[in-house]
Amino acid sequence: MKTTIALALTPAAMAGFLEGLGEPPYRADQVLDWLYRKQAYNFSDMTNLPQGLREKLQKEAKTGFLELVKQQVSDDGTIKLLFALGDGESVETVALPYRTGHSVCVSTQVGCKMGCLFCASGMPGFVRNLTAAEIMAQVLQVKKLLAAEGHALKSMVLMGTGEPLDNWAALLPFLNAVHDPARLGMSLRHVTISTSGVAPRILDLAKLGWPLTLSVSLHAPNDKLRGKIMPVNRKYPLSVLLPACWEFAEITGRRVTFEYLLIDSLNDGENQARELSGLLRGMQCHVNLIPLNAVPELPFTPSKDAAVLRFQEILRQNKINVTVRRKLGADIAAACGQLRNTFRGSEQDGCRRDKRQGKSQGKK
Ligand code: SF4
């Protein structure tokens, strides 16, 4: 029989589950309160429940919280957590100390199918989707850790390992739990979904009309270069991706953020800044320039400071809203594109990487 995971249940499903154990429906509110407000990792900690119910719950269900395997703290206050999943896989989650408050960056898949060339997270290839409960557990466990240090969790970004829009089946129930007042109760205005550019799902997301922030990893101003460094562009080129982004902005009234990694001598030239300005002219958007975070195994180096400033200046001259993202967590490999799952050791990572290389060679 499949074990019930409490974090996977909606309030109605929780009430139904408890009813099946012979309990009144109001117990559902109590259990949800322990899970989402107090982050009780074990049913035995839910002290206002009768002892008999706590025992029944321990026998019939799991809370769904994850085992913390490793915690690293950066000089700038960024915290990187490595969690073990029930099947022996692992994921990384990051707590980011922004000036406007703390944010959590969650992973949505173990590995990633997208194969962006500059990214460590996708290097081992795709293993599996995370469940909505596994994504929520990352958020709640970071929330608890921050609370212990006197900080509140203000926002979240789905920007860790994985492509969130490639895990639609978990994304929707997760987002429902995020803005449900009986569960996490966080406004979707504080949620950013990052995508490599899965255009049809951007349209699906737009149709929901939720006030989320959409963050699109652009990283190149034309199809030729983007297709080289981001295989997803071969399926959804800029002529498909950008109209989907415009539609998102129009339906939701939220401006779209475009992430642009600056890689030395690859995409950081003055002509490329002009080309990018032309591409985004007239669109309600914001460009976030991110000096690359180096990954030792990958053949890319960060742009020089002068190139970053010049790129930014050209976008500004062309009236594009632009900022340069502050680097956080680079000393503990918690920065953008540096996350990976290190729990099961390099032997297995190497094996997955070989598999992916084998696949891509086959495609050529
Ligand atoms: S950048 Fe994002 S979408 Fe691309 S491989 Fe890395 S995790 Fe996947």
Image (cartoon, grey):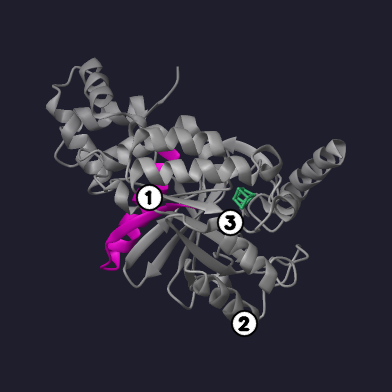
Tell me the distance, in whole angstroms, between the alpha carbons under discs 1 and 2. Answer: 34 Å
Looking at the image, can residue 85 be seen?
Answer: no
Q: Are marks 1 and 3 in contact (CB under 8 Å)?
A: no
Disc 2 target residue: 305
Disc 1 target residue: 139
Q: Please give left or right for residue 348 compared with residue 107 in the image.
A: right
Which residue appears at 54% of the width and 68% of the height? 289
The numbered mark at residue 279 is 3
Q: Are marks 2 and 3 in contact (CB under 8 Å)?
A: no
Tell me the distance, in whole angstroms, between the alpha carbons under discs 2 and 3. Answer: 24 Å
Range covered by the magenta-colored residues: 133-159
Say which quarter of the image contains residue 234: top right
Cβ at disc 2 under 8 Å from ligand 1:
no
Q: Relative to 353, say whether 77 is above or below.
A: below
Residue 142 placed where, x, y %? Answer: 37, 56
The magenta stretch spans residue 219: no
Q: Please give left or right for residue 209 compared with residue 2 in the image.
A: left
Looking at the image, can residue 255 be seen?
Answer: yes
